[in-house]
Image: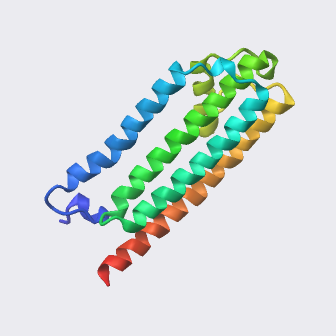
Amino acid sequence: MPDDDASFGLPEVGGRRLLWLAVLRPGLTTVVLLIAYFVLPLEEFDDVSAVVLLTGGLLVVGAVCAWQVRQVLRSPYPGVQAIEALLLTVAVYVVGYSTVYHVVSYNSPESFDEPLSRIDALYFCVTVFATVGFGDIVAVSQAARALVTAQMVGNLVLIALGIRFLTAAVKWRQQQTKT
């Protein structure tokens, strides 16, 4: 019976450790991002700053994705690196949109059916990302609906293209190590 780690191309000795590190590093990064999200004075931003923040955030997500694909292409264990890449990219993406939702709600409380605290904004962002859409928080203004629509499109792009690029990078790297 083959070892479970074989599908990731992990070595027999230390393979599980590499897998744990691939989850631990983005997990710690997520904790740092969430601490920053809950501590930084986001209320000082206005609506224009929110758009700039969203644009900058999307550029950061793109840069993180590109850097992670590069890391996968260089890694001796591309499957493990791909897991780390996906977790890190999703964390940056979700915290970024949560930040924008909170700033927009703070500056324009009528944008949503209720003012969003930081935890409400994070909750709303995760429900949109997970395509759950409970309906307990609703975008009301045109600007808020445009933001939510942008996140939904971004979700599809992130999930579809992100997984596709990472899978292709892993396969390419595995072929490179064989030759």
Q: Is residue 62 above or below residue 23?
A: below
Residue 136 in view: no
Instruction: Write the residue at 34% across / 64% down.
Output: 75
Q: Is residue 170 left or right of residue 152?
A: left
| x and y percentages locating residue 47 in the rendered image | 78, 27
| x and y percentages locating residue 49 in the rendered image | 73, 30
Q: What colour scheme does the image use?
A: rainbow
Give the quadrant of the N terminus.
Answer: bottom left
Give the quadrant of the C terminus.
Answer: bottom left
Kindly indicate the quadrant of the structure image that contains residue 143.
Answer: top right
Looking at the image, the residue that sits furthest to the left is 13
Q: Nearer the viewer, residue 40 or 20?
A: 40
Residue 109 in view: yes
| x and y percentages locating residue 101 in the rendered image | 68, 28
Q: Is residue 133 above or below residue 153?
A: above
Q: Is residue 176 left or right of residue 115?
A: left
Looking at the image, the residue that sits furthest to the right is 142
| x and y percentages locating residue 58 in the rendered image | 64, 45
Q: Is residue 52 left or right of residue 170?
A: right
Instruction: Write the residue at 62% across / 29% down.
Output: 99
Instruction: Write the residue at 59% across / 60% down.
Output: 161
